Image (spheres, helix red, strand yellow):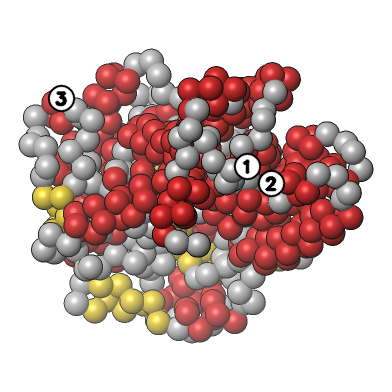
Amino acid sequence: MSWEMVIDEVFVFERYGDLLVLLQNSIWAGALIGLVGGLIGTFVMMRDMAFSVHGIAELSFAGGAIALLIGSDLVTGSLMGSIIAAVIIGIVGAQSRESNSVVGVLMPFGLGVGILALALYQGRSSNRFALLTGQIVSVNDVQLVSMAVLSAVVMAGLLIIWRPLSFASTDPFVAQARGLPVRTLSIVFMLLLGVAVALSVQIIGALLVLALLISPAAAAMNFSASPVKIVVLSVVFAETAMVGGILLALGGALPISPYVTTISFLIWVVSWVARRRRRSRGRAVVSESGSGDHSTTGSAPGRTVTVAGN
Amino acid sequence: MSAVPAASFRDAELAFGHRTLWSGLNLEIEPGEYVAVLGGNGTGKTSLLRVLLGLQPLSSGTVHVAGQAVRRGSAEIGYVPQQRAFDDRTPLRGRDLVGLGIDGHRWGPRILGRKAHRERVNTLVERVGALEYADAPIGQLSGGEQQRLRVAQALAMDPSLLLFDEALLSLDLHRQSQLAQLVAEQRDRTGAAVFFVTHDVNPIIDDVDRVLYLANGSFRVGTPAEVLRSDVLSELYGARVEVMNVAGRVLVVGAEIVDHCHPPTTPEEVTR
């Protein structure tokens, strides 16, 4: 295959307008999970749980594959898989040392079960690996509504526990001293994460969920340490990757995940370079100028803070 | 001033299984009083703080904070933990850490009153002299700077009791004395009582009103001059312990050997 043929295969824009109308449900679905992924991703990063997300995604894949095999509802199957994984990790303690080994054990098991179910599955072969690598699923109205409801549940849940979860995630000892139910918060968060992962698996595939739940938030954190800015940037990056990826993938026959993961990877690379450049200015680090916070204090923005001992 | 004690223990006992950490503890801490809690590892110093925070029930006896039975999440208490390095990428600035002390326990995002919140944070940050680096990512600040912000965080609710749990550990001597000075200033300014758990009393010895020395399942309370004496501590430990004043520092020699004879089962680790 020549380079031109590859390009032709990757970027297809024939009858684009028709496709846009035809697949608008998928675009809405992508926008929804971009929003959910960008939001919850900031907490995943805050709690240093990238590996757990991967483990949950693999069990979500297994659940979906089993549902496909027994002719049950795929969304329900993957939801069950990811919630079971999330609860197990939550009980073990997502930040404990043990959780890494638990995830490491769950992950290959989930993949194995999923692959077995897919191998036994007699249906359309194009469906088979969609759960792993994603595709433009033709999302129908019913599916879109169910995705919207689940997204709303995750977002409402996150909003309710927003501040206590931020407190418990970044400063657990003081949060506990202030009387916050740190452990309960952790388990509630795992449940919400389970739902978010199951949603994402539908569109982007289990193997690539991290591109939606990790990369945008990680990139946002490279740009800022302000919680508000991080959330906004993370959602913007996730939407760019998700909706941009779907729009690029629309015309061709390729799955959407390579597009989504590439965009989200490129955003992260830019953020990483920006962070490096910021940090390598001598031995000093220019602090965030803050979101106008200085006005009330009268101190100058862009003040230089010397990092001792580094 | 009809002073309600900032904290009071009555016949308080704490035991884990067969091991009694301390018993018969009767202690009233007056508002503005500065108490250092000393003792080796596993003598129940941190557990004492957990009791005051309502995270650890007493085996027997009662404990009150500001005249009320202890409960979790009391706004009467400010808590400063041991300095632990924040990850370089922790998505918080110094001011956000302080802000969590104000309303981090409330449900929902912070939507209303952002301006008032910001002003309150600025006041607190200014009070501990941390304005200069309040907008820097917390993970890039030195241990001393982080602890300063933690003091601001603990002061957020105007507590009547400030708890410090080995808050000077892992700071260099210079930073230790700076932070100790800050604590004393805030005690004087707010009139809050201070309960300072530490394994080294020297950085705070000039500020301390009383010492609570835990060892060997028992304790001694009194002014530093009353408690930090060879005969008193030898009796407490049941072994020869020498207290020496060297170059203005108090050294307790022999105690570390006795302390280490206890199995290092730290109850606070178990319950976490």
3D distance between C-alphas at marks 1 and 3:
50 Å
- Drawn side of residue A289 relative to residue A247, left or right: left
Residue drawn 42% across and 28% down?
B103
Sequence-earlier tag: 1 or 3: 1
Q: Is residue A19 visible?
A: yes
Query: CB of mark 2 within 8 Å of CB of mark 1?
Result: yes
Question: Mark 1: which amino acid?
Answer: Gln
Sequence-earlier tag: 2 or 1: 2
Q: Which mark is residue A135?
A: 1
Q: Is residue B100 visible?
A: no
Subunit bearing disc 1: A
Viewer-side residue, A167 vs B269 = A167
Q: How many C-alpha atoms fall within 10 Å of the one at disc 3: few (<14), some, or many (≥20)?
A: few
**Which quarter of the rendering shows the N terminus of chain B?**
top left
Viewer-side residue, A280 vs A249 = A249
3D distance between C-alphas at marks 2 and 1:
6 Å
Percent from the top left, x then y, of residue A122? 89, 49
Q: Which mark is residue A130?
A: 2
Q: Which mark is residue A243?
A: none
Question: Mark 2: which amino acid?
Answer: Ala
Instruction: Give the quarter of the image for residue B20.
Output: bottom right
- Drawn side of residue B247 relative to residue A67, left or right: left
Q: How many C-alpha atoms fall within 10 Å of the one at disc 1: few (<14), some, or many (≥20)?
A: many
Sequence-earlier tag: 2 or 3: 2
Question: Mark 3: which amino acid?
Answer: Thr
List the residue tagged with mark 3: A296
Give the structural element (helix, strand or loop) at label 2.
helix
Residue drawn 39% across and 57% down?
B87
Subunit bearing disc 3: A
Percent from the top left, x then y, of residue A161? 55, 30
